[in-house]
Every structure is written in structure tokens, then in C-alpha cells.
Amino acid sequence: MIVECLVTTLAESGELNVAPMGPRFGDDFDWQAPIGGTFHLCPFEPSRTLDNLRMVRTGVLNFTDNVLLLAQMALKADHVQWPVSRAAEKIVGRCLMEAGRCWEFEVVSLTANGPRWQCNCQVVHTVEQRPLMVFNRAMHAVIEATILATRIGILPSEQIRDQIAALARLVEKTAGPEQQAAWDWVCHWVERRLSSEHNRSTSASSIHGEAQP
Ligand SMILES: Cc1cc2nc3c(=O)[nH]c(=O)nc-3n(C[C@H](O)[C@H](O)[C@H](O)COP(=O)(O)O)c2cc1C
């Protein structure tokens, strides 16, 4: 099973990095007694998370229902504040105060597997900070829209707009104010990025004489 969470890691300098990642758990993983259990992270190369895991070899899985935070950390918007964190208890790392649950882990082994690495990790300590929300379809819509946002420049713009329009129905039906705010933030980010991509490609084709007025 793959779940979505925020992985915090530290650079050798001590600088914090926060990135959404999907850790993979085997079918035999014991969710009731996670300490000692193992999972895989599959960070792309290049990424800060991968660099930090290779150098420092510890990190924290922060489980959250705050989809605005997840979107902002994925899209690395300039003006966004870094979330508040505290020192981890058993490893070199930091736990996000906004997370419901923090699992501190150590890297057992790292293997290059094409552009995506396989990082085998072991849970060494867990902290429950607050209860997490139950299923909400609008939250899933925000996560999917965030993933689409990371694919701007890879997928055609129309495909991204169509898929976001389909997800909007889930938000209209099921969002509370926090999910609505997260949805609005992601949609605004996507529209800004799509327009600047469009302007860049229009000016590139006009330089090459393809779109003269
Ligand atoms: C829900 C979600 C799950 C993601 N899972 C992964 C993942 O498993 N591996 C990965 O390399 N990137 C994943 N990403 C993309 C990274 O978060 C994104 O590339 C980020 O910019 C990497 O940041 P870093 O350079 O700070 O490590 C995911 C993004 C989202 C929104």
C-alpha cells in the first residue's frame, strides 16, 4: 500500500526540507505496532529528500490531513511559510507540529533504480500528536490536483484543465472551508503557471517567426 505524507529530512548543514512522498508498505506491515517495521521511499533523482537521505540517513514521516500544507510543500511556492517543527526524539530530524502522527525512521539501505531510488527504511519511534480526519473526497481532489500541478510542462495544458474540472465537482460536493481554501490555492497556482507556460511558448514561437501578428 502507498500512503501520502510529508517527509522531513535534514541536510548535513542542519537545514530542514519538507516534501510530499508516497512511502510503500508491504502487505505484512503491522499498522498497530509499527516500530521495527520497514517501508520503502522512492525519491526521484535529483531531489533534496534523496540527497539528505543519502547523507544523513534518517527522517520523519509526517502524516497529515492538512492538504493545503501538502500542496504548498509540493509546489514550493516562494511566499509560503515553512511549517513549524520540533526536534525528533530518537533520530536526527524534525517533526512537523501540524502532523497528526510522526514516525521517525532510519535508512537501512539505498539503491539506485533508474531515476527513482529505492530507499529501505525502518520505523524507530512514533508519536501521536492529534487525531486525523476521516475520509473526505475534497481532500483527495486537492491531492490529485497537486499531482497534476507537478506535471505542468509534461502533460498537455488541456488535459490538466479537464482533469481539474472533473475534480472540482468533488470539492463542490464535499469540501469544508479548509479544503476549499486549499483547492482555491492550488487552482490559482495552476492557472498562473499555465499562463506563464503559454506566454513562454508563444514568445518562443514568435522569435522563430511562427506566430507573426
Ligand atoms: C501526493 C504526492 C506524492 C508524491 N510522492 C513522491 C514520491 O514518492 N517520490 C518523489 O520523488 N516525489 C514525490 N512527489 C513529488 C515531490 O514531492 C516533489 O517533486 C518535491 O518537489 C520534491 O522535493 P525535494 O526536492 O524537496 O525532495 C509527490 C508529490 C505529491 C503531491
Image (cartoon, rainbow, N blue to C red):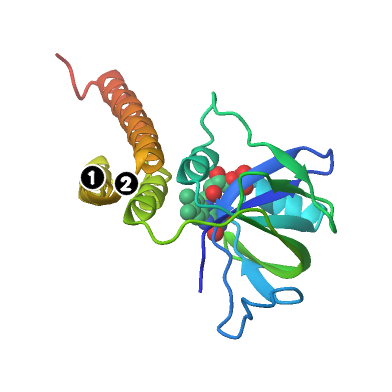
Q: Quadrant of residue 180?
A: top left
Answer few, some or many: residues within 10 Å of disc 2's Cα (few below 14, many 20 plus, some between 14 and 19).
many
- Label 2 near ligand 1 (CB < 8 Å): no
Give me the residue at 77% from left, 37% from top: 15
The image position of residue 156, as x and y in percent, is 27, 45
Q: Nearer the viewer, residue 54 or 207?
A: 54
Q: Which mark is residue 175?
A: 2
Instruction: Report which residue position mark 1 lands on.
Output: 172
Q: Residue furthest top?
A: 213
Horizontal side of 11 relative to 153 (left or right) equals: right
Q: Which mark is residue 98?
A: none
Count every numbered label the image shows and give the total: 2
Q: Quadrant of residue 117?
A: bottom right
The image position of residue 48, as x and y in percent, is 67, 45
Q: Residue furthest left?
A: 213
Are dots 1 and 2 in contact, CB under 8 Å?
A: yes
Give me the residue at 33% from left, 56% from top: 137
Horizontal side of 152 relative to 54 (left or right) equals: left
In the rendered image, which quarter contains the C terminus? Answer: top left
Q: Nearer the viewer, residue 86 or 188?
A: 86
Spatial CA span between label 1 and label 2: 6 Å
The image position of residue 174, as x and y in percent, is 28, 51
Horizontal side of 28 relative to 38 (left or right) equals: left
Give me the residue at 71% from left, 41% from top: 85
- Label 1 near ligand 1 (CB < 8 Å): no
Give me the residue at 52% from left, 59% from top: 4
Q: Name the residue type under label 1.
A: Glu
Q: Secondary structure at mark 2?
A: loop
Q: Name the residue type under label 2.
A: Ala
Answer few, some or many: residues within 10 Å of disc 1's Cα (few below 14, many 20 plus, some between 14 and 19).
few
119 lies above or below 28:
above
